[in-house]
Amino acid sequence: MAKKEYLLSFSRISLGLIFIWGFLDKLFGLGFSTLRESSWISGTSPTLGFLKFASKGPFTKLFQAMIGNVFVDWIFMIGLLLVGFCLIFGIAKKISGYSGALMMFLMWLAVLPPEHHPFLDEHIIYIFILIFLAHTKTKFSLSNRWRNLKLVKKHPILE
């Protein structure tokens, strides 16, 4: 296996772990970004902290209006979980890559302008990497087994 295949696989799995960690930390309040008393299972909106304290710029009112919206909370948490899971296992690459990119784009919109650059920050870099990974074959994945499932054969968009 070439070095680039290792690097691509490591990048895919690492990004998946970032999404899964975000899910677990917001769900249980593991004390990194989210305190236990601010966790989702403690009754706090998982989007509260970011939308209330990090959002700024031209879309602040739009994003802060979403705080506590049950639909937004569920979509956000399901998105973190599924994108992370799919990236780690290398399945549903296009849907997970583009969904993750959309999540990063929305987070980028919420913090405009970024702190250290007029328009570029880690969210944009993640977008490029996620879209690239959506169109790249990597090793250490279940993509071959996933691709052979009846459901995936019937609906190729799931590949």
Image (tube, rainbow, N blue to C red):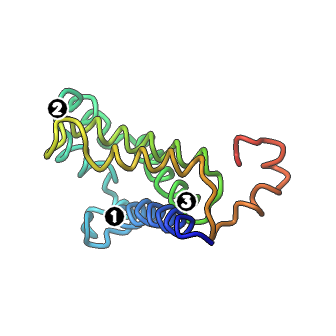
Please state the horizontal and vertical placement of residue 54, each as a whole percent of the image. Answer: 19, 46
Q: CA distance from mark 1 to mark 2?
A: 30 Å
Q: Nearer the viewer, mark 1 or mark 3?
A: 3
Location of residue 97 in the rendering, given as x and y in whole percent from the top left corner: 53, 47
Q: Label 3: how many residues lie within 10 Å, few (<14), some (14-19) or many (20+)? A: many
Residue 153 at what x, y percent from top left?
83, 47
Quadrant assignment, res 105: top left
SS state under label 3: helix
Is disc 1 in contact with disc 3, using a CB cutoff of under 8 Å? Answer: no
Residue type at the position of mark 2: Gly
* Residue at point 60%, 44% (across, down): 95
Q: Nearer the viewer, mark 1 or mark 2?
A: 2
Q: Secondary structure at mark 2?
A: loop
Within-10-Å neighbours for mark 1: few <14, some 14–19, many 20+: few
Q: Which mark is residue 57?
A: 2
> Which residue lies at the image location 69% right of the left edge and 65% below the top edge?
142
Count of labels shown? 3
Question: Up-down: is 89 above or below 155?
Answer: below
**Residue at position x 41%, y 44% in the image:** 127
